[in-house]
Amino acid sequence: MELPRGRAWELSDRQLGILFLLPFAVVSCLFVIYPALEAVRLAFYEKLPFQRTLTFVGLDNFRYVFADPVFWAALRQTVVWTLASIVLQTVFGVGIALLLNQTLRGINVFRGLLLFPYMVPTVVIALIWRWMFNPEFGVVNAVLRGSGLISAPIYWLATPLWAMVSTILLNVWKFTPFVVICVLARLQVIPLELYEAAAVDGAGAWRAFLHITLPQLKTVLALVVVFRTIWTFNKFEEIYLLTRGGPGTATFNLAVYAFEQATANLKLGAAAATGVVMLTVLFGGSVLYLWLIQQEEA
Amino acid sequence: MRRATRKRLRASLIYAALTLITAVVCFPLLWAVGTSIRPNEEMLRLRLLPEHITGAHYAALLTGRPMYFETATGYRPSTAPAQHFLTWFVNSVLVTVTTTVLCVAVSTLGAYSLTRLRFVGQSVVPYFSLLGYMTPSIIYVFPLFLLIVPLGLADRLPSLVLGYLSITLPFSMWLMWAFLKSIPLEVEEAGLIDGASRFQVFRLIVLPLALPGIIATSIFSFIVAWNDYLIARIFMNSITQLPLTVGVMHFFEGVHVDWGLMMAAAVLMTLPLAVLFMFVQRHLVVGFGAGGVKG
Amino acid sequence: MRRRERLTRRRFLRWAASGAGAAAFRLPAATLAAEKTGTVRVWGEPGPYGAVAVDGMNEWAQQHAPGLRFAIETLPWSDVYPKLMTDLAAGRPPHCISVESPIAFQLMAEGLLEPVDDLVQKIGRTRLIPAARWEYWGAWKGRQYILPAHHQAHLLVVRTDILREAGVTKPPGDWDWNDQLAAAQRIKAKTKLYGLCFALGRNLATDYYVISLLHSAGGRMFDADAKFQVVFDSPAAVETFEYIRELFPTMPPGAVGYSFLDVVDSMVTGQTAMVFYWGRVFGRAAEINPDLFKGMEAYQHARHPRTGKRYNWNDFQGWAIPKDNNPYVAEVRQALTHVLSSKEWAIRYVHSLVPNVSPVFQDVVQDPRLLQHPFFATKRRTIFEYYTEALKHASNSGNELLRGINPLAGIVHGRSILAQGIEKVILDKQPAGDAVKWVQQQLEAIRREHLRLLG
């Protein structure tokens, strides 16, 4: 391509367009599309541990996974974990967003502090959690025992129930800000006239919330809930770094199950099969998400 | 008068609620800071406030605290986690900044092209990008690893950049597409009519308008790259090549759990994000709210 | 006449040239090793000893391959499998490995390791301590693949001061399982400490604990004399699971999540009075709690009342050399020979973590310099319990009752099968018999899937 001299290099619009798109296309194909396809392909193969040969096994990996009681336990636990996390995140998220949606002085300070957990690395918060919830020396048990609420230490990470609670709390702590951001953004564009009209009509704060705010938030909440559900369903680090899926397999979710299949059982095929299950759930959720977006734009 | 009082009462209630909630939410971080300045002798005693304050843990991270067996035998194996903290920090910074720059550049250019150009399958790309974002990295990680090894990049920092691009690019594309889509074409038309080239229009008109989106994408990219654990753990091996996330977990698996050191590491690891966050907090709401959810 | 002179001269020149030529051919080979550059990656478990050995290897490198640098990479116990899996899959193994023996045995059976029979000769076939055989560290189908680094047994470690406080009078060296349980219960009842602690989390450590008790009770996972048939489901296994269940109330409740280092902490922070542990716990106690250290003693495990056995889980840990995709095989062989032939390096290795790392060569054990470590002043008896006594009761899951190496053990531990089994009893409160049957099924599945390894 000859570049004309004396001017800033100039390509036709179309050429420029292709040039701009090229890096994205290349990187996507190599590092996004190819691994995803390969991950699906691997589900139909088995790789001998420590060897590099792949053997085609058809649906064997799926049969193995579906026959494994740990898989179903992981699925059940994923649903519980996701449900609890989403409900709490939504309730807290909306509540905090409402509180932050005020034109009071210094509200920005609160906003900053309350949104920060979203940015904290999972590793950091998992370590802090492990320290805080340490049964003998952690501050949580110290406060609970000191105030007389419990008499014996709670083994947060060693009892199946409390381990699940700990991971849910961590998830809620870290991701409620996401809900807050989205809801807050929406709240800020609700026309004030609606509220003024309601105030004139004598409606109280609660009724204003029910009849004005909530309907306005409906679509955003639907989007946020679907989005967060998909995301939470497949989370790995939040559970693994805190409990490693333990005690036993009590806090396994599908992602941790897949990781364990690959790294502990050395069954890469089984891990890939679990991945396919996760992708299927993902796909279903995304279709729902996109449908909702279409609805909102209509 | 009553109205003003009610307003003030309402305001105080809101402040009180916010203060309480903020205190609870920020407590873990505050507790980490408190632990990081607590001397080891007091660590296992159950007191809320320490009697003495020490900077020893931070000093240890910067100079390298030997593990216990070193003091007894005089041997200094090169694996004490504290010795490598600074290296990990530098690794994280390098990888994160590179990823962010590349991610923003690639996604902005690509999104511009996507919103201005017409070609087959165009409308599908953003939605595929979103799908890519929602795919958990556990699915990518092993095939990606098998891909980078023949390239000779295993255990090298550039492999992390590639790995992080694979998880940041899809959503960044989605974000930038959403932002650029909302910039009306007329603005560019005006520029073109005035005789500017397409590239100049892009550089001088579109980019400034898309700045909120670019900032949002940068923040997102930065956070994801800085915080990732899984990809770094699978790709990187040598202790000097680790980023902070994986390195800091070494504090756990070493000889014993040194809580003070670990919390100091946690604090230092979060500090850059806190700084970043303070500066761009405002944009975060605008960026995510407008572009992220509604599309 | 002239012709013969010329021929003679030509022949002479040819001879000289060929002599020089031969010398020239020899030279490049020698400089090849000396010219090699790069980092030789050595994997080891957490602890200072790996680094000491690597220092020894670097001493060799300085003299013979100055462009090379040996570097230790310490892998946490929970990380070995993921790292091995990904790196071997990608064709990028470490250049030298020292890991838990069951894992090493698995690598050996998979054909991934370099045979080292010739090095055994160079290091000294007869130098081994009398109670040990070269095969214990890693021989497969008649060839040696792993060179001995050390052995490390876990023993019953007690706080004599707490035993006194609780009124336990019978010396731990005379205990059987019932005495042990009674002592633990008494300590829990009469003092502020827990009676006993070992790991019960879903990890390697728990498997080791269960195995040693199983062996003492007379059970095994696989039958080495009958093609490694799975023989786990047995009264001995049920008895072992039930014994652990009886011990559990005397343990810290958090033990269900414990791995190796948590048990150490449990002892040295004064949470528990007795642990089953390797020698590392003494070093840790000496560092953070010298008073506690004073009262700690180690004994062989309690006898099983019926069999009289008191097996410990002894890790015969050695050095293995991956043979594929490894450009430094020759250099690693020579460096290892250098380190293992040297008494000085052996003593430094052992001294780096007394009494965790036990010496394997007789001349090292008898060397007076071995005793020049501060711990020998007060803990000499304990140290020799680890160094020599433990060998009389040594067992290993990869070499059950030392009757034959079984590569399946690595896979069993990778999935923490035994840990999962005991957790069914402790966490899910299942009857021991059901949990034992579950473990039996898992072991049979593993044997089926990996039959080729045993063939």
Image: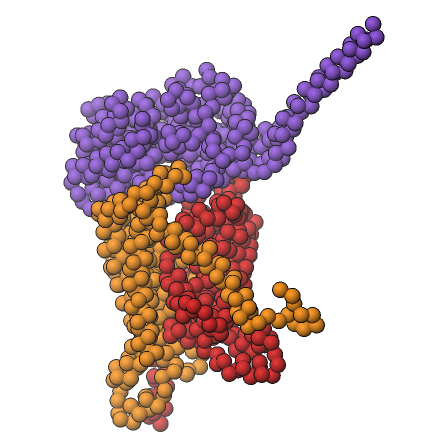
Chain colours: A orange, B red, C purple
In the rendered picture of this protein, how many numbered marks are placed on residues? 0
Residue C377: give x, y in percent of width and height: 46, 28
Q: Is residue A194 visible?
A: yes
Q: Which residue extends farthest right?
A: C2
- The residue lying toward the viewer, choosing from A111 and B55, is A111
Residue B219: give x, y in percent of width and height: 48, 67
Q: Is residue A94 visible?
A: no
- The residue lying toward the viewer, choosing from A216 and C241, is A216
Q: Tell me the quadrant of the picture where the C terminus of chain C can be found.
A: top left
Q: Name the residue: 29% across, 31% down.
A: C451
- The residue lying toward the viewer, choosing from B277 and C296, is B277
Q: Name the residue: 40% across, 41% down.
A: C85
Q: Tell me the quadrant of the picture where the N terminus of chain C can be found.
A: top right
Q: Quadrant of residue A9?
A: bottom right
- The residue lying toward the viewer, choosing from B14 and A277, is A277
> Is B126 situated above or below C383?
below
Residue C83: give x, y in percent of width and height: 42, 42
Residue A176: give x, y in percent of width and height: 35, 68
> Is C75 situated above or below A134?
above
Q: Name the residue: 43% across, 25% down.
A: C145
Q: Name the residue: 32% across, 69% down.
A: A289
Q: Quadrant of residue C24?
A: top right
